[in-house]
Amino acid sequence: MLEASRLSYTIDGRMLVDGVDVSVPSGSVSALLGPNGAGKSTLLALIAATRRPSGGTVLLDDTDLGSLPRRERARRVALVEQDSATDVELSVRQVVLLGRTPHQSMLAGDSAQDGTIADEALETVGMSSFAARRFHTLSGGERQRVQLARALTQQPSLLLLDEPTNHLDISAQLSVLALVRSLATQGVTALAALHDLTLAASYSDHVIVLQRGRVVAAGATDATLTPDLIRSVFEVDAVVLRHPESGRPVIAFG
């Protein structure tokens, strides 16, 4: 279980995250929502310990993530960031194999098992045929899938995703979020920053809503994503309907 308590982050005198409490149950998919500039990416970076908080703690299964050595933390937590552009001359498969680094000794190369795990991850995200391609030649959506495969090769118990559906067409968006849901059924805890409220409603168990660096709502998706909340935080009118087959919330804007 992920528990963040009183997390804050200040830079150049500006408070980007202000005393945030986050609770994400094990084996669930939680959506991190909020308008642009609400602090979603910063909060994910604080949880992943790629940024040091100004205050607060992050616990994963009662272990303080901030106190762990970097390699040990990387065995437990994988972060897929928004911007994966690079000019480094690596193949897709080499990028994915980077996810095995935390599991290797300092001088060891990639083992046969590492290769198998990487190939399985590429197959999972539908990128096996791109294995030999240069990573920097891929489209934004293709890079996003490769970075997700890299995260899967870390075999984390906590998967953090910053706008994982960016650059993807609707079919790929649904495929990626269905994959995240399937990982949750295997015990992986997922927290994904999303800007599409309908996708969040369709695929998440819980939502955490940020506004100006503070949590303004959190809880089960059905109970939390109400028209009043959407109007207050996103300044748009919406109606929450029910999908006739899945029963999941469907958000219509008017």
Image (cartoon, rainbow, N blue to C red):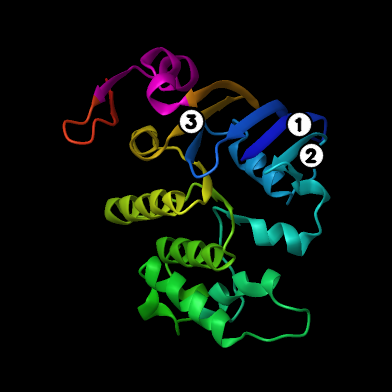
Between residues 4 and 148, which one lies in front from this camera angle?
4
Q: Residue 59, which numbered label? A: none
Label 3 close to label 1 by CB (< 8 Å): no
Q: Residues within 10 Å of mark 3 (few under 14, many from 20)?
A: many
Residue at x 38% of width, y 77% of height: 128
Question: Does 11 appear in magenta?
Answer: no
Q: Is 42 left, or right, of 121 in this rendering?
A: right
Q: Along the polypeptide, which appears first: circle 3 or circle 2?
A: 2
Label 2 close to label 1 by CB (< 8 Å): yes
Q: Residues within 10 Å of mark 2 (few under 14, many from 20)?
A: many
Spatial CA distance of label 2 from label 1 is 6 Å
Specify start and end residues of the magenta stretch as a single range: 220-241
Q: Tell me the residue that label 2 is attached to.
A: 53
Spatial CA distance of label 3 from label 1 is 19 Å
Between residues 22 and 228, which one lies in front from this camera angle?
22
Spatial CA distance of label 3 from label 2 is 22 Å
Q: Is 35 left, or right, of 21 in this rendering?
A: left
Choose top left, top right, bottom left or bottom right for residue 244: top left
* Amino acid found under the numbered disc labelled 2: Pro
Between residues 167 and 229, which one lies in front from this camera angle?
229
Q: Tell me the residue that label 1 is attached to.
A: 8
Residue furthest left as drawn: 244
Q: Tell me the residue that label 3 is attached to.
A: 207
Label 3 close to label 2 by CB (< 8 Å): no
Choose top left, top right, bottom left or bottom right for residue 4: top right
Q: Is residue 14 above or below residue 184?
A: above
